[in-house]
Image (cartoon, grey):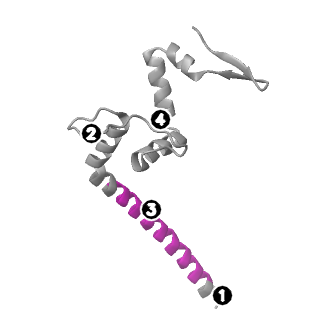
Amino acid sequence: MSLHIELIGGKLSVNLWSVLEEFTGAERAALIDALACQTEIIDEVMNQVIDGWTSEGSRGGKGGSIYHTTYHGIDHAVRRIAKASGEISANEIARLEAALIDAEKRQQVGWDAYHELLRSRT
């Protein structure tokens, strides 16, 4: 294993690319799976899908031409989202409506308790 480690400003700096090169396929897959669940990474991928760039101005591979098969990661993401957008939208709307129904029920319970309290004082 050949890791590139430097002392920079009194701190050890590890070259992550050299670490990744040493990972087995299973280790790399486990790392990717763990990272894919991190909010910051999800946000940056969505920035690329929607805006074409990360917040720092980087981007993964993106094809310049359109083909029936996508060849780059961001192109794959855009195509999958486009194909699933109806279902994704319907699921999100249903989730939001369910949350509103729950909030309205809790609000009604509060109003009922408030009115009961007022009635008990008269």
Tell me the amino acid under the disc marked 3.
Answer: Ala
Q: Nearer the viewer, mark 4 or mark 3?
A: 4
Of callouts 2 and 3, the N-terminal one: 2
On the image, numbered disc 3 is attached to which residue?
99
Position of 122 with respect to 59 (left or right) is right
Q: Residue at x 45, y 38 (%)?
A: 59
On the image, numbered disc 2 is attached to which residue?
65
**Residue 104 is covered by the magenta coloring:** yes
SS state under label 4: loop
On the image, numbered disc 1 is attached to which residue?
121
Q: Position of residue 55 (x, y in %)?
A: 53, 46
Q: Nearer the viewer, mark 1 or mark 4?
A: 4
Tell me the amino acid under the disc marked 2.
Answer: Ser
Q: Is residue 48 above or below residue 104?
A: above
Q: Residue at x 25, y 41 (%)?
A: 66
Q: Position of residue 33 (x, y in %)?
A: 46, 30
Look at the magenta stretch and give its main secondary structure: helix
Given residues 10 and 93, the one toward you in this image is: 10
Q: Position of residue 49 (x, y in %)?
A: 40, 45
Q: Nearer the viewer, mark 2 or mark 4?
A: 2
Separation of marks 1 and 3 at Cα, in angstroms: 33 Å
Q: Position of residue 103 (x, y in %)?
A: 49, 67
Residue at the bottom extreme, as displayed: 122
**Residue extent of the magenta highlight:** 91-117
Residue at the front extreme, as displayed: 64
Separation of marks 2 and 3 at Cα, in angstroms: 42 Å
